[in-house]
Amino acid sequence: QVQLVQSGAEVKKPGSSVKVSCKASGGTFSRNAINWVRQAPGQGLEWMGGIIPIFGTANYAQKFQGRVTITADESTSTAYMELSSLRSEDTAVYYCARAGRAGSYFVSFDYWGQGTLVTVSS
Amino acid sequence: EIVLTQSPGTLSLSPGERATLSCRASQSVSSTYLAWYQQKPGQAPRLLIYGASSRATGIPDRFSGSGSGTDFTLTISRLEPEDFAVYYCQQYGSSPITFGQGTRLEIK
């Protein structure tokens, strides 16, 4: 059974950065894309980007280009999402989600982490 | 970017009734790349349907998906109390991956 366990809630100041982790267990980590999706309070889902750990390079939504960095550590089966230059509009629950098939970004998301609330406030 | 528009925004039905949720895309989506998710309050989304019509593992057969091109539908044949939630469609055939704004299914 695949499990994705994310790091805990964060409170950040505007202009700072946050780094959220997502540790996978069960299944294969390296070949399935790990995606990051965020959800502002009371709002819908927004894809930020993803990474296939064995390839190492990430695919980002243009909206977040230059502000988000997604990485993965195969040795610990952990993916990371770092968002910089935080503003109040970045307050959201951030989810990691695994692609349901190996080797491609263009796959539905079959397993999700529990979510990490990031609050940006002065 | 492919924009997905879901309708209705809110659907009020009773247990035992049939629910029909719509997802319309701004440009054609290969049916291989259309999914539906269910989200309950305080929980992560759960994959229901992928490839427009394939049920994910463990999903009851009262959930079915159909459609092609720009028009897709999620049908719940007989609503159970646990089905009242928010439903999102997603296209994953082109970058950026996008989601619809959601349909809230509430108890009438």
Image (cartoon, coloured by chain):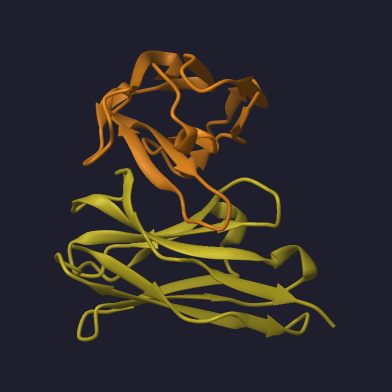
In the figure, residue B29 lies in which quadrant? Answer: top left
Q: How many marks?
A: 0
In the image, taking residue A113 as reference, residue A105 lies left or right, namely left
Relative to A91, say whether B85 is above or below. Answer: above
Relative to B91, say whether A111 is above or below. Answer: below
In this view, the residue in front, B76 or A96, is B76
In the figure, residue A68 lies in which quadrant? Answer: bottom right
Quadrant in the picture for the N terminus of chain A: bottom left
> In the picture, which chain is yellow?
A
Q: Position of residue A92 (x, y in %)?
A: 65, 64
Q: Position of residue A20 (x, y in %)?
A: 49, 78
Q: Residue at x 20, y 69 (%)?
A: A29
In this view, the residue in front, B42 or A61, is B42
Q: Residue at x 39, y 16 (%)?
A: B77
Q: Residue at x 29, y 59 (%)?
A: A33
Q: Position of residue A10 (x, y in %)?
A: 62, 82
Q: Position of residue B16 (x, y in %)?
A: 46, 18
Q: Is residue A59 visible from the viewing direction of this image?
A: no
In this view, the residue in front, A47 or A42, is A42
Q: Residue at x 63, y 77 (%)?
A: A84
Shade representing chain B: orange
In the image, taking residue B29 as reference, residue B54 lies left or right, namely left
Q: Is residue A14 visible from the viewing direction of this image?
A: yes
Relative to A43, say whether A25 is above or below. Answer: below
Residue extending farthest to the right is A122
Quadrant in the picture for the C terminus of chain A: bottom right
